[in-house]
């Protein structure tokens, strides 16, 4: 236990290293469950993935990660594990930080870090694609379209700001 505390303090947090181990263990459990599900459904463990499907899955993973970690609508998911700091950026983008100790803090880190949760979103999307390709691609297309709509909205805002600076009101 003393060794565990020393390790956690080296990283600037008083979080038990065992909590991070449990997170990694749960990731391994998900992969193991996938293996057994693929055996149960008699599906190949890996399928060929076209470039366009990989593109949809990648964009969907990003959008899902962003929604889970930054969008105000999903604050209820993060609330038990994070503290709200305020709104930042376009739309209802939130700034939050992890709270609590042990597993609560580690889950808070995952749910407030889009980079961190991205691996989980991508993994779940890819594994579901291998088991249920049509449904997963339909869901991935939905999130990819949402992401494209976000890009168009941001470009519209940027263009509006440029035009209002070029042509100030009299």
Image: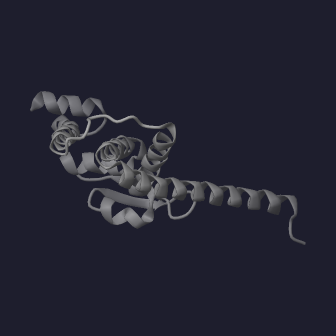
Judge whether 31 appears above or below 93 on screen: above
Q: In this view, does 163 lie above or below 32?
A: below
- How many marks can you see? 0
Q: Is residue 116 left or right of residue 55?
A: left
Q: Which residue is drawn at 86% across and 70% down?
A: 169
Rendered residue at 44%/45% (across/down): 57
Residue 71 lies, in percent from the top left, at 45, 60
Instruction: Please state the horizontal and vertical placement of residue 90, each as a whole percent of the image.
Output: 58, 59
Nearer to me, 74 or 143: 143
In the rendering, at what x and y percent does residue 38 appear? Answer: 21, 41
Q: Can residue 39 be seen in this view?
A: yes
| Image quadrant occupied by the C terminus | bottom right
Q: Can residue 101 be seen at all in this image of the molecule? A: no
Task: Pinpoint residue 134: horizontal percent, then vertical percent.
Answer: 38, 52
* Position above or below: 74 against 105: below
Of 42 and 145, nearer the camera is: 42
> Which residue is found at the position 20% from the left and 41% from the top?
42
Furthest residue in direction right, as rendered: 170
| Residue at the outermost left position | 1
- Asked if 153 appears above or below 125 in the picture, the reply is below
Q: In which quarter of the image is residue 119?
A: top left
- In this view of the protein, which residue sits in the foreground, 130 or 31? 130
Q: Front-most of 71 and 131? A: 131
Identified at 88% across, 63% down, the residue is 167
């Amino acid at each position: 236990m003393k060794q565990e505390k020393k390790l956690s303090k080296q990283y600037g947090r008083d979080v038990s290293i065992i909590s991070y181990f449990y997170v990694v263990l749960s990731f391994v459990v998900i992969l193991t469950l996938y293996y057994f599900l693929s055996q149960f459904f008699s599906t190949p463990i890996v399928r060929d993935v076209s470039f366009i499907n990989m593109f949809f899955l990648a964009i969907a993973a990003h959008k899902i990660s962003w929604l889970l970690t930054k969008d105000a609508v999903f604050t209820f998911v993060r609330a038990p594990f994070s503290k709200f700091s305020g709104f930042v950026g376009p739309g209802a983008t939130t700034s939050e930080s992890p709270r609590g100790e042990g597993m609560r803090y580690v889950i808070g880190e995952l749910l407030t870090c889009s980079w961190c949760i991205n691996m989980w979103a991508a993994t779940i999307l890819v594994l579901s694609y291998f088991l249920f390709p049509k449904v997963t691609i339909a869901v991935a297309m939905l999130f990819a379209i949402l992401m494209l709509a976000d890009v168009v909205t941001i470009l519209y805002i940027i263009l509006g700001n440029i035009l209002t600076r070029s042509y100030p009101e009299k």
